[in-house]
Amino acid sequence: MVSDIFLEIFDRLPRQGPGKNECTKKAFTMLSGLPARPHIIDIGCGSGMQTLLLAELSGGKVDALDLYRIFLEDLNERAIKKGISDKIRTCVGSMTDLPYERKSFDLIWAEGSIYIMGFKEGLSYWKQFLKKGGYICVTEINWLTDQPSEKALSYWNNYPEVAMKTVEENKETISELGLDCIDTFVLPESAWWDDYYNPLEIRLGEMKKKYPENADFTEFSEEIYAEMEVYKECSADYGYVFYIMKKKE
Ligand code: SAH
């Protein structure tokens, strides 16, 4: 479990990881043959910018799961404001132990969260919850070149839990797991800044006034600033990639 200060940094932000409504929509429109009212799960939904859009686009019901209640409270409030709270059901739980029956979903969605389990581990565990012919769409951070800069390499190699792969490596994993990779696309840089890094930077500025001497806050904010600096310089080396996949049987 993470500290309260960490959660306060991310609470009531537009989203908790890189992403963009335009990209959510682009991926969703690639799915053909979904039922009229698909049953969807959004894993690691955070405050649910993409959950709300999925509920609107799909005409179905979305189960939205996250480990932290505060993000789900935010999502519930947003859903009420939009008048679509009947389409979204939030659940506090872990992606590593999903509280659903096997073969429950037409579509599994996970933006910016599969890295927590690992791309391979996440897909191989989650796919049992898909119905036959169901889709699974995730975003994952990947190297976009075979020769990333020293700066990007040394920064990301310090985070072994992320263990960044190339798109080709992930495509091999997808096929090893018996899934079809229908398409992939790289999210634009604006997906990192507009609804994620920019609001996060403003939040860190505000919290600095509230916690000028707090060691936890100082450490977290330095880590986040360092990550942003690396992205500013090395955005050609790595990025978030949307994977649109289908379960054959
Ligand atoms: N999908 C959202 C949030 C991405 S950030 C977006 O794109 O904005 C990753 C999310 O995963 C956070 O909301 C975090 O609380 C959640 N998370 C972390 N560990 C988790 C776990 N074990 N199970 C479920 N969610 C988890």
Image: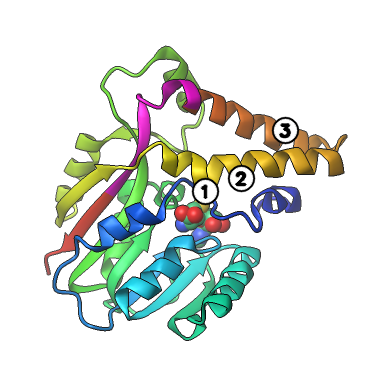
Report whether 183 appears left or right of 223: left
Report whether 185 appears left or right of 91: left
Q: In which quarter of the view is residue 102 placed?
A: bottom left
Magenta residue span: 232-242
For label 3, the residue is 219
Q: Is mark 2 on a helix, strand or loop?
A: helix
The disc at residue 199 is 2
Q: Judge by depth and name the residue closer to the eye, 164 or 227.
A: 227
Q: In which quarter of the view is residue 168 placed?
A: top left
Q: Earlier in the sequence, mark 1 or mark 3?
A: 1
Residue mark closest to the camera, 2 vs 3: 2
Report whether residue 211 is seen: no
Please report the residue visible at 68 percent of the width from the left and 53 percent of the height from the top: 7
For label 1, the residue is 195
Report whether residue 237 is seen: yes
CB of mark 3 near ligand 1 (< 8 Å): no
Cα separation between marks 2 and 1: 6 Å
Q: What element carries label 3?
A: helix
Please, is residue 198 above or below residue 71 in the view? above
- Report crowding for label 3: few under 14, some 14 to 19, many 20 or more residues within 10 A (C-alpha): few
- Report crowding for label 2: few under 14, some 14 to 19, many 20 or more residues within 10 A (C-alpha): some
Q: Earlier in the sequence, mark 2 or mark 3?
A: 2
Cα separation between marks 1 and 3: 23 Å
Going by the numbered disc 3, the residue's amino acid type is: Glu
| C-beta proximity under 8 Å, tags 2 and 3 | no
Q: What element carries label 1?
A: helix
Residue 111, given in percent of the width and then of the height, sits at 40, 54
| C-beta proximity under 8 Å, tags 2 and 1 | yes
Please report the residue visible at 46 percent of the width from the left and 45 percent of the height from the top: 18
Residue 13, given in percent of the width and then of the height, sits at 61, 54
Please, is residue 12 above or below residue 154 in the view? below
Going by the numbered disc 1, the residue's amino acid type is: Asp
